[in-house]
Amino acid sequence: MKEFALNGSLRTETGKKAVKQLRKDDTIPAVLYGGEKNILLSVAEKDLKNLIYTSDVYVVNLNINKKPYKAIIKELQFHPVTDRILHLDFLQVFEDKNLTIALPVKLEGSAEGVKQGGKLNLITRKLRVCGLIKDLPENITINISHLALGSFLEVSDLKFDNFEIVEPKTTVIATVKTPRIIIEEEEELEVEEGEGAEEGEGAEGEGEKASDETAAE
């Protein structure tokens, strides 16, 4: 996984007044959970831009008053009108313990179905995985070259050596949809073939009738 360095400062004061002052000073109140005790801290708002406003997922190397911690963002709170960050919850993680986290899905390759005129749809953009930090990738890269027209890819089709996907096996990740024009052409072809068969049967019946009449004469 990618890593992100972030400095924080211990908070000694709590309450609405203290939090309001922090935000006024362009710092964001936060809490680090998951260790021996919860740690109240604050981080500079400007330092969060590249961590928050991205599709990438990071392990955060937190430096709180010169003491290091590894963490991930567990929860974010935004202002309902301005979208400004109001609060951060970090979860402390450890090198020797499994971590469950949602990672972005990245598709690679050109699906066979797309070459045949189909449309590729990414249904699930993130998948929850479980494993040691050192074994977790930046994203879940999936080759979709084999996907045919009208087919789909689900979690049961995936297998990785160093980590596990903890989603239902039937979770659909991507599909190659058949365009309406192809469906309509196939339906028209079926109708034409059906009409041709009926006409053939009718002609055969008329031929038999004519033969019978000739025999009667």
Image (spheres, rainbow, N blue to C red):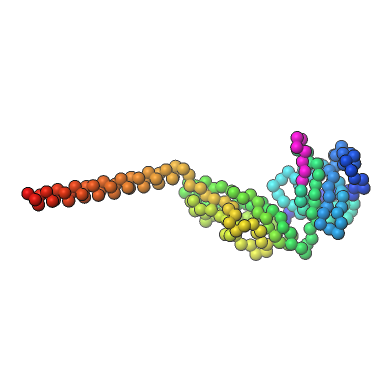
Q: Residue at x 13, y 51 (%)?
A: 212
The answer to which quarter of the image holds residue 53 is top right
Looking at the picture, tell me which residue is in the foreground, 158 or 61: 158
* Residue 97 in the image, given as x and y percentages of width and height: 76, 63
Q: Is residue 77 magenta?
A: yes
The answer to which quarter of the image holds residue 100 is bottom right
Q: Residue at x 75, y 37 (%)?
A: 80
Residue 199 seen in this snapshot: yes
Q: Residue furthest top?
A: 81
Q: Is residue 130 magenta?
A: no
**How many numbered dots are placed on residues in this image?**
0
Q: Residue at x 59, y 49 (%)?
A: 123
Q: Is residue 25 left or right of residue 76?
A: right
What residue range appears in magenta? 76-82
The N terminus appears in which quarter of the rendering? bottom right
* Residue 16 in the image, given as x and y percentages of width and height: 88, 41
Residue 70 seen in this snapshot: no
Residue 81 higher or lower than 115, as above or below: above
Q: Residue furthest right?
A: 12
* Residue 186 in the image, given as x and y percentages of width and height: 40, 46
* Residue 82 in the image, given as x and y percentages of width and height: 76, 35
Q: Residue at x 75, y 45 (%)?
A: 52
Q: Residue furthest left?
A: 217
